Image: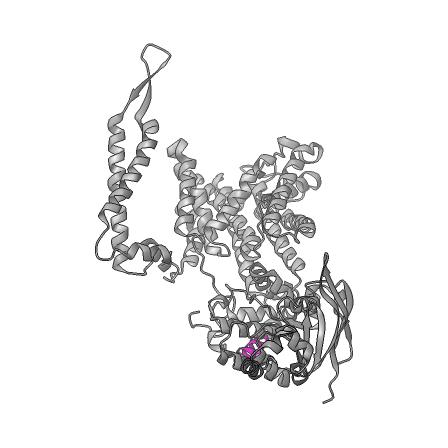
């Protein structure tokens, strides 16, 4: 399968008053690949996400999403909810945002709101109880069940989402985003707060999504074990600028990245055994 | 709750007697300070003079203070022994309260059957049936507002505006075009929904407190317009002689108009004014049940789930492709149209409407019904409406203490059940139906 560009970010700049959070950022994410955006705290990673998913309007720049059929959506011009509805951008949040008092299954049903609204004739036909709506609803439940199985949440489908353990909530958020049938899935620190085993499970889940759904994934992550293992492509930000872009292997050896993470002089001053440790961790 | 429970259970070995005595003494001291001016002095009419005399009642003060001292002591001892008996347990009343919804009595159907039987059980007692009508109007308003506040989570302090729009729609349509109640009912709902959209369009981007203030203002605007636009609305004098609804064209009158038969004559009954009251009762019961059915169905439709999701997290909703403005607007419009139906019924039942009936206190009572009943709970709202309408009626004998009791009951309910009478949420869809959630 030849890779084609999925998401093209051109000269993206975002200013908040006098603060430039993102400065002339350009990168391309390929379809069917996992693209990781990494960088020290405050580098502007989440801001990039918020621009892509329409929560912020970029000051300057162009964000183009190309569908498989060749249609191109310019995300910087669309309303937040239309980016999800029409362009097909799914996302999760750094601080989990589930519908806490609704059940796990209801969360996944809300994610299928737009097709179900059409099936219910924008409520009017559903109110009368047309059989076609019942059919659409059963299909939606089956689709939700597929993602519950994928995220190992089937047993807890009727639990209130807020009562799930933390790791389950993280997976549920991914399942909910996938229920919108996105063409690109944006994950904001999906491994934050997970223990090593949960983190390994997450890697498997994300690789499955990439390989089985054949969609592109965009990932912000601090956990280098996740980034280095599963990413096909890494973009490194520092102070809102791109300082490196390439495969995990290339980025890992980029002197700019090492400097950004450890400071210019520090690498030379560090004792050799610590540098060796850092290498093992995959940071240097 | 758990934090206070653990501290209270720590003296497991025995009760902390000095602390208990100190606590009781402090409470008694507060009672003393309050009792001296409130109980200690009494005024009386001096015989043969117009002035008042003052006498003291120290005995009563002493009795009160002693009673408070021992009452507090007993309460604290009971509480501590109860808590230490079951460490980590919630207090008794919370446990009792928590067990109420678990007992799956078919309480809703029972209430419906009871509501249907009211005019038969109290046949001939127009007063009871009339209160029943008032209760059902508030049940319907509560259910209507429940869509907006309970499901969609939009705090609306001006709901009475839509009630007013419904009532005036019927009154004015009758006066200008001679339309009957049954023709006006859908129109009243439509007008109220239109006003809901007109209000909703600019303000639904606001959230929480800000939305509450704007809706409060809207409610007042409608009322002030009704008072001041005298040519159109009749101003503060209101609109009188609004006709009562007919039974398929047959009026409830002693003498039939030209060429028509009355309800009584058609069924061969002797004319009695109570027929009309009973008929009105069943009309509002039907309207309320229709509201209930529609609301319950809406909850299980995608729009209802989107309302609840919007209440929980608007940002997450946007990330799922839900249009927040449209979704809120539908909640507002549907809530408003239900208020409009209730308003049209109110107009036909009273026969007279004026802006007096649509003051802020009405909005506050309807909101109180929704909050006390438990946001989003249909049965809870019905029970709360029953309580808030019947209590002041029962309290009539207590004259001036009536509103005091009313307020106290509201406080007690909120302390007892902070989330309302019935706050347990039933999932709108289940993966494994039958299994408990």
Task: Name the foreground residue: B112 vs A112.
Answer: A112
Q: Quick check: A265 above or below B394?
A: below
Q: Confirm whether residue B246 shows in the render.
A: no
Task: Name the foreground residue: B128 vs B93.
Answer: B93
Q: Position of residue B290 (x, y in %)?
A: 55, 56
**Residue B47 location, quadrant:** top left
Image quadrant for the N terminus of chain B? bottom left
Image quadrant for the C terminus of chain B? bottom left
Q: Quick check: B194 above or below A216?
A: above
The part of the chain drawn in magenta is A138-148
A144 is within the stretch colored magenta: yes
Left or right of residue B369, residue B121 in this image: left
Q: Confirm whether residue B90 shows in the render.
A: yes
Q: Position of residue B332 (x, y in %)?
A: 62, 53
Left or right of residue B179, residue B351 in this image: left
* Point 46% across, 67% down: residue: A163
Q: Position of residue B328 (x, y in %)?
A: 63, 57
Residue placed furthest toward the top: B48
Task: Name the foreground residue: A82 vs B420.
Answer: A82
B334 is within the stretch colored magenta: no
* Point 35% across, 10% down: residue: B49
């Amino acid at each position: 399968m030849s890779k084609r560009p999925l998401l093209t970010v051109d000269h993206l700049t975002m200013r908040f008053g006098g603060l430039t959070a993102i400065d002339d950022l350009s990168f391309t994410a390929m379809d069917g690949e996992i693209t990781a955006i990494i960088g020290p705290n405050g580098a502007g990673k989440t801001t990039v996400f918020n621009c892509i998913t329409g929560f912020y309007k970029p000051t300057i720049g162009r964000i183009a999403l190309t569908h498989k059929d060749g249609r191109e959506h310019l995300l910087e011009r669309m309303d937040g909810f239309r980016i999800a509805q029409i362009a097909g951008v799914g996302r999760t949040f750094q601080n989990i945002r589930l519908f806490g008092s609704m059940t796990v299954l209801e969360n996944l049903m809300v994610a299928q709101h737009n097709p179900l609204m059409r099936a219910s004739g924008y409520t009017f036909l559903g109110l009368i109880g047309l059989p076609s709506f019942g059919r659409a609803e059963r299909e939606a439940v089956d689709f939700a069940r597929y993602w519950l199985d994928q995220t190992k949440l089937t047993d807890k489908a009727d639990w209130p989402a807020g009562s799930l353990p933390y790791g389950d909530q993280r997976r549920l958020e991914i399942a909910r985003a996938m229920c919108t049938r996105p063409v690109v899935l944006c994950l904001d620190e999906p491994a934050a707060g997970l223990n090593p085993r949960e983190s390994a499970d997450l890697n498997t889940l994300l690789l499955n999504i990439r390989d089985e759904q054949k969609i592109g994934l965009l990932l912000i992550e601090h956990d280098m074990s996740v980034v280095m293992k599963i990413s096909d492509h890494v973009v490194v930000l520092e102070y809102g600028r791109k300082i490196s872009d390439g495969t995990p292997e290339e980025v890992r050896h980029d002197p700019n990245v090492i400097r950004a993470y450890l400071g210019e002089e520090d690498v030379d001053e560090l004792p050799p055994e610590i540098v060796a440790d850092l290498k093992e961790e995959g940071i240097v | 709750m758990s934090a206070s429970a653990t501290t209270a259970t720590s003296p497991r070995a025995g009760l902390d007697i000095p602390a208990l005595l100190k606590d009781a003494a402090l409470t008694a001291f507060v009672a003393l300070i309050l009792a001296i001016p409130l109980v200690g002095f009494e005024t009386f009419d001096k015989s043969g003079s117009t002035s008042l005399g003052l006498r003291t009642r120290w005995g009563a003060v002493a009795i009160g203070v002693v009673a408070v001292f021992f009452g507090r002591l007993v309460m604290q001892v009971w509480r501590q022994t109860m808590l230490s008996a079951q460490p980590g347990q919630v207090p008794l009343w919370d446990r009792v309260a928590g067990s109420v919804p678990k007992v799956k009595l078919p309480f809703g159907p029972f209430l419906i059957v009871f509501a249907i039987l009211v005019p038969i059980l109290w046949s001939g007692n127009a007063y009871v049936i009339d209160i029943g009508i008032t209760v059902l109007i508030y049940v319907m308003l509560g259910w209507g507002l429940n869509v907006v506040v309970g499901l969609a989570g939009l705090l609306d302090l001006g709901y009475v505006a839509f009630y007013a729009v419904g009532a005036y729609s019927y009154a004015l349509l009758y006066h200008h075009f001679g339309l009957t109640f049954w023709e006006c009912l859908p129109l009243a709902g439509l007008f109220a929904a239109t006003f809901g959209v007109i209000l909703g369009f600019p303000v639904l981007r606001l959230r929480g407190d800000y939305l509450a203030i704007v809706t409060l203002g809207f409610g007042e605007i409608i009322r002030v317009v009704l008072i001041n636009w005298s040519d159109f609305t009749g101003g503060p004098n209101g609109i009188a002689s609004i006709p009562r609804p007919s039974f398929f064209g047959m009026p409830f009158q002693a003498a039939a108009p030209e060429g028509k038969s009355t309800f009584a004559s058609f069924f061969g009954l002797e004319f009695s004014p109570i027929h009309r009251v009973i008929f009105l009762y069943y009309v509002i019961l039907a309207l309320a049940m229709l509201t209930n059915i529609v609301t319950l169905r809406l909850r299980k439709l995608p729009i209802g789930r989107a309302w609840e999701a919007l209440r929980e997290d608007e940002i997450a909703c946007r990330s799922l492709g839900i249009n927040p403005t449209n979704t809120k607007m539908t909640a507002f419009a549907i809530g408003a149209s239900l208020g409009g139906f209730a308003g049209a019924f109110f107009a036909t039942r009273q026969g007279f409407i004026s802006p007096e009936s649509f003051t802020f206190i009405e909005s506050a009572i309807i909101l109180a019904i929704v909050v006390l009943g438990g946001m989003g709970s249909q049965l809870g709202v019905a029970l709360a409406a029953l309580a808030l309408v019947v209590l002041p009626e029962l309290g009539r004998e207590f004259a001036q203490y009536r509103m005091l009791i009313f307020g106290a009951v509201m406080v007690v309910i909120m302390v007892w059940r902070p989330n309302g009478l019935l706050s347990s949420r039933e999932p709108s869809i289940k993966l494994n139906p039958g299994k408990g959630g």
